[in-house]
Amino acid sequence: MKNLDKLRELNLKETKKKLKESVTDDILIIQTINHIEDLNKVINILSKDLREWYSYYNPEFSNDMQDHLSFIKAILDKKDKKSKDSVGADLSKNDLKPLVKLSEQINELFKLKEKQEDYIEVMMEKVCPNITAISGSLIGAKLIQHAGSLRNLMVMPSSTVQLLGAEEALFRHIKTGAKCPKYGVLHSHPLISKVKRTDVGKAARILASKISIASRVDYAKGKFIGDKLMKEIEEKFK
């Protein structure tokens, strides 16, 4: 009986140890990216609500300022001047209070998102310096998120890395014969917007190839070669 108790205690101790060790840096990166995406959804919903509400008061100003954060800051800084010929209703200060309060709350969400993005940048520089040098911290983190882990990203062929984030479009292509996507998360990489339209597929392939190399080096905690890899990419499009 004593041996069984001892075995149970050792098993429990080992299980606790494994649970602690299972919380890796890439898991923290994935959770933070998930949170940032949730914040983006909430910010977008609340900003649309605010604009619809505010348009009853000053529709012209809302239409002129498309950026949500700039729009919110203008309300909070009282720069949302209403023209004399506005078609909006004349709301009292008391009626405008809920609008200001909502603007304050959305502004705080923007600040939280910024802090989470700063954390992602620090973590990616620490864990994946080579991937970050090529893709930037947010794109790199999203690639890890879609792959499920840094290890998964490391073992993927570059053709799969290229399409991470385009799973729905790829499924549609397979099921209905729709146009095959050229890239997923990589669509927001600066290089994709810089190259000629005819070179977009080539740019995505080269980026994915170099990111695949970078992920293997980062997973093995190898030396920094991100600058060299990025230079090789740039040379291709001179």
Image (cartoon, rainbow, N blue to C red):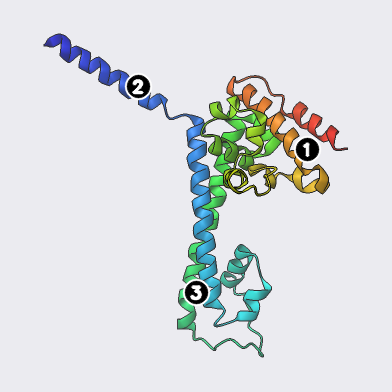
Q: Where does residue 44 sit, x and y in percent of width and height?
A: 54, 61
Amino acid of disc 3: Leu
Pointer 1 residue: 202
| 151 lies left or right of 12 | right
Q: Cβ–Cβ below 8 Å for labels 2 and 1?
A: no
Q: Cβ–Cβ below 8 Å for labels 3 and 2?
A: no
Amino acid of disc 1: Lys
Q: Cβ–Cβ below 8 Å for labels 1 and 3?
A: no
Pointer 2 residue: 17
Helix, strand or loop at mark 2:
helix
Residue 99's mark? Answer: 3
Which sits earlier in the primary sequence, circle 3 or circle 2? 2
Within the image, what quadrant is residue 85 found in? bottom right
User: Considering depth in this image, is 192 or 49 the residue closer to the camera?
Assistant: 192
Query: Which quadrant of the rendered structure holds the N terminus?
Result: top left
Which sits earlier in the primary sequence, circle 1 or circle 3? 3
